[in-house]
Image (tube, helix red, strand yellow):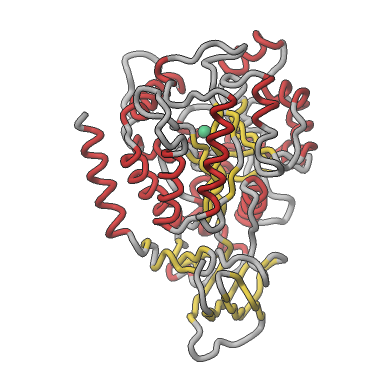
Amino acid sequence: MATGTATLHAKSLLGENGWLENVRLTLTDGNISTLEADCPARPGDECHNVIVSAMPNLHSHAFQRAMAGLAEMRGTGSDSFWSWRTNMYHFALSMTPDDVEAVASQLYMEMLEAGFSRVGEFHYLHHDKDGTPFANIAEMADRVASASATTGIDLTLLPVFYAHAGFGGTAPTDGQRRFINSVDQFEKLIAACNITAQNHDGMVVGVAPHSLRAVTPDELAKISQMVGPNPVHIHIAEQLLEVKDCLAWSGQRPVEWLLDHADLSAQWCLIHATHMTDDETTRMAQTGAIAGLCPITEGNLGDGTFPAAPFLAQGGKFGIGSDSNVQISIPSELRQLEYSQRLHHNSRNAIANISSSTGRTLFSHALSGGATALATDSGIATGKPANFIALDTREASYLAEDHILDAWIFAETITVGDVWVRGKKVVQDGRHIARDQIAPRFQKTMCNLLSK
Ligand SMILES: [Zn+2]
């Protein structure tokens, strides 16, 4: 948290209830202590054109950033999610704690440069290369927390419980050895993560049963009770083969099974939820559980199209995550989501309500849904953490209000300029303040990993 006081002025600012003009902010000890609209700038104010809230990134696997650009060569047969996963396991098995910290630091720096202020790290690379737990069972989790501290991004850590290779409690494969815990061992991991959180401002510890493939019903019930009211995240219905296997195991589809066997609420975040029937879509929306959408990764992996229009029409809530971290971009995630719906429905402006801006609709949903999923606050208002973005509007200074968001998301003629997290400016003119230290370490790590 930044200590002391700073004052800023914005010609336009997107507040909780809409656009405000000539806004003066006072930041005190990391929070917004005053917000005055229709107020001229005063001497000493740092002046900006447009300020909007920073965004939560609700789903990340940090180590997968190492694979960005390395999984786009077509193989000898038909490539799929499952052949990509084999490639991903190769990376997962070769990385040391130092490697993970270097890659996560690069990634979190890029997230801040993109305008994300908090990451939900769905963390499952727990053990040493041979599958033995480290002397400190939370060694890898601590490296992720260190990367968040180094870069200044806030962290909702979601330690993953992973125990099985497939539905019905089948034994894990050798390639999964670094992910596997017993329930007792996992309880120790959560306890260690809670101790780490005491030394990291703003850190939240939730829990993530990996998927219905990787946990039994009994384990799911135990794991989801381990963190009190904190978030519970689970991968669900991402792939058609997963739906088929779930039907063979239980006679039910994955989301249908979860709706019938877990007490879903806003505490839960269902990552992907791509393949749902109309009935599942309606029922999921009614629970208040957040849909954790990762449009770039879902497109990259060929997952399918989330039924966004009917889900939102039923009051469903969503946030966005960068998941495999092949690209880090708020506008690209939101645009891909909207375009997937346009292609599916052969229409334009598929998600917004009548006479509403699509950019504003996407941005507002992702902000509030993401914040709920990561147990954090969002939006710009007095008393809230000072997490926001000054947009660089130099190439489109003639635009106002919601057109600014539409131009950012659909044209990218507007870009991220400066970013503050809990009152500290961590990005200036699109560049992280510690990029010169963080980026070379990542480059060196990648050269080492690729020479193995
Ligand atoms: Zn994921």
Position of the C terminus, as image quadrant, is top left
Residue 60 appears left or right of 338 = left
Q: Quadrant of residue 78?
A: top left
Decide: is 397 above or below 313: below
Q: Position of residue 95 (x, y in %)?
A: 32, 33
Residue found at the far bottom of this picture: 43
Q: Nearer the viewer, residue 26 or 302?
A: 26
Relative horizontal placement of residue 251, taking residue 51 as reference (left or right): right
Residue at 32% across / 35% down in the picture?
96
- Say which of 243 and 199 sits in front: 199
Q: Is residue 339 something that shows in the picture?
A: no
Q: Is residue 122 visible?
A: yes
Q: Is residue 416 left or right of residue 385?
A: left
Q: Residue furthest top?
A: 248
Residue at image coords 55%, 59%: 54
Choose between 322 and 6: the one closer to the eye.
6
Residue at 66% of width from left, 40% of height from top?
A: 227
Q: Relative to 226, is 424 above or below?
A: below
Instruction: State whether residue 43 is above or below residue 27.
Output: below
| Residue that lies at the very extreme toward the left in this rendered image | 451
Q: How many marks?
A: 0
Identify which residue is drawn at 69% across, 65% down: 16
Q: Position of residue 142 (x, y in %)?
A: 44, 44
> Percent x, y for residue 283?
79, 31
x, y (%) of residue 174?
A: 41, 15
